[in-house]
Image (cartoon, rainbow, N blue to C red):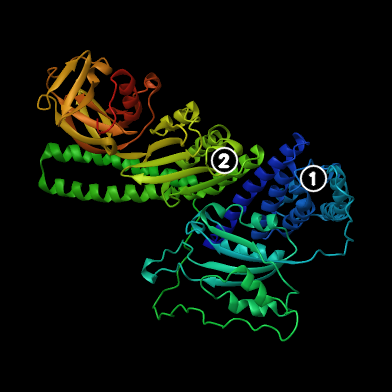
Amino acid sequence: MSEPTAAQALAERMLQLFQQEAQAGLDLLAATLDGDRSDPQAAATLFRVFHTLRGSAAMNGLDAIADLAGAFESRLEPLRGALQPLDADSLALAGQGLPLLRRLLASEGLADAGLDAAIAELRGRLSLAAPAALAALAAQLPGSPELPLPAPDEASAPRLFHLIFEPGESLMRRGVDVLGLLDELDWLGELVLRPTLDRLPALDAMQPDSCYLGWQMLLRTEASVEALQDVFMFVAADSRVELHELALAGALAPDWAERARPLLRHRPALPADQLAQQLCLPASGPAASPLHDEPMPVVPQLDLDLQPASAEVVPVPLQRLNRQIDLVGELVIAQSTLIQLAAQLQDPQLSNAVEQVMRLSTDMRDSAMQLRMVPVGSLFAELAQAVADCAGRLGRPLAFSASGADTELDMSVLQALRAPLLALLHQGAEQGLEPVEQRLRLGKPAQGQLRLAVEKRGGEVLLTVSDDGSGACATELESVHATLATLRGSYRALAMPGQGSQHLLRLPLAQDIIDSLLVSVCDSTFVLPLAQVEEVVNLRAARGADGHGQDILNLRGQLLPFVRLSRLFELDAGVDAQDGQVIVVSGSERRAGLLVDRVIGRQQAVIKPVPALCAKDAALSGTTILGDGSVALILDLAALLRRAETEWRVLPDGH
């Protein structure tokens, strides 16, 4: 049997991802049905499940699942915005549809005769249930007059919307089907669109996995504003999405679509009232002529001798990537052995060969680490949705903004950060931001602001979660501390009374292989992450002194406490108390020194787990194997700095 092509493998991987996502959605559907059925948010939750399921199933060609989910979506559309409990018919229909959708998912969208009949019967009930549900909903609203129900074949008046959509450059890297979003809009009505090329860079600056196009659109539809907003639900956080309904002064011209095309070419976009005027029939007299049809900017066609490209994306199981990292780690350990051997033999030719191996292994290490790196922006949509859910639950207007979407982290690190970031945003929304009335009294805007900023600083990544509230939620969360400790990072919370709070999360870029500094203390070897080392100074030259039980270093006029590692790990005294070298380290805006006997040198270190015997020592973050086969302990500098802050009163930077 021949090997599957790259396209076939990619399609199979997309199907696997869909099945995982769909299973999670159906589990949420089941939990909602089993939960508090009087919850007014239940209809919105079910709508989101069916909306996502319909779009994802259609993308994978599973029409039976997409059609059934779409029928539920249409059924729930008039109920979700009313903030009323689901009626009995909706609950019964959703309960009947859940096992049918699970059977379709298990069979990859293929239904037998019995399943087809059950689905057809359910879809018939869905289409008949809508008028009764609307009547029940109207009866639930206090003081509402009896609402006339439309006949089944009577359509509501179409509306005209003007949309501007500029996808974030990272959407395609996250696997978002940008054209699929446009297909969803087209499915909702009659769509006229024009691409915008304002963000198109020079050819040599283009990245194949970035999206530079935008679109200006007019959509004639009977769908609600909420339905249009839901199309962009998972991309609005890092994209430009503008949606305006046009106020039509008269009847829409029969040839409105033809009139719209030249209007959409204008830069900047025409005002809404001018668009509406040009698309409507005049009250009397001849029809208004469209604005001048300006030529569209044209992308020059270049005569390039390009070979047909192979697939740009090849799905690779995570286990293979992890195996690749493990092999590179073994190569680094073997390299350390070669370095020691070359130093012992003093052979120039061998030393030159070892240097070449070092360069190649470093490049291979960096390349292997990049395989598991993903942009932080892939998490932004979920965080934005969580803030939106908080806003609905609390009944407060909240805004979420995020920057640094292109900063990349190891996929396992990003997954581990998901829960801490959600916890910090929930804490900020629920405890940090004041109620609307209080914000207005304080002169703040009614809408509370939650922000996430991600930036790379040297060998570290800094994530800052902030709000513009009272500063009351600056309490540090132990769960965040615990997660950052496993990632060899640090966490601090800062309160700014009346202005808000900040939560600072720092963690190293590399999690498996790091550049390190080897030091010796009493014939024991320790490893320090090089990214946190600032400098090395001689203790005697820097005039170390003992004051009230504290070791203090006078470093160019600044007092810097230092820790004697021999005392910390209860080792026999090494060099004289006033000799040795101090390694100045920093992290979380704190600095301290570590006193060692001598510096051995730099080396790449493959991080291994801490043995069970030493697991309770908070000053250790891992172990590594040296070139001679011995094991060295990797120091957790963030933990040492925290310990120094409490025991040795570490001073902030600049003091």
In the rendered view of the protein, which quadrant contains the C terminus?
top left
Residue drawn at x 44%, y 64% is 208
- In front here: 583 or 386? 386
Q: Amino acid at mark 1?
A: Ala
**Which image quadrant for residue 32?**
top right
Any part of residue 317 in sight? no
> How packed is label 1: few (under 14 Cα within 10 Å), some, or many (20 or more)?
some
In the rendered view of the protein, which quadrant contains the N terminus?
bottom right
Disc 2 secondary structure class:
helix
Q: Which mark is residue 535?
A: none
Q: CA distance from mark 2 to mark 1?
A: 42 Å
> How packed is label 2: few (under 14 Cα within 10 Å), some, or many (20 or more)?
few
In the rendered view, does 594 fall on the left or right side of 439? Answer: left
In the image as oriented, which residue stretches furthest toward the bottom?
A: 286
Q: Is residue 121 above or below residue 418?
A: below
Q: Which residue is mark 1?
A: 94
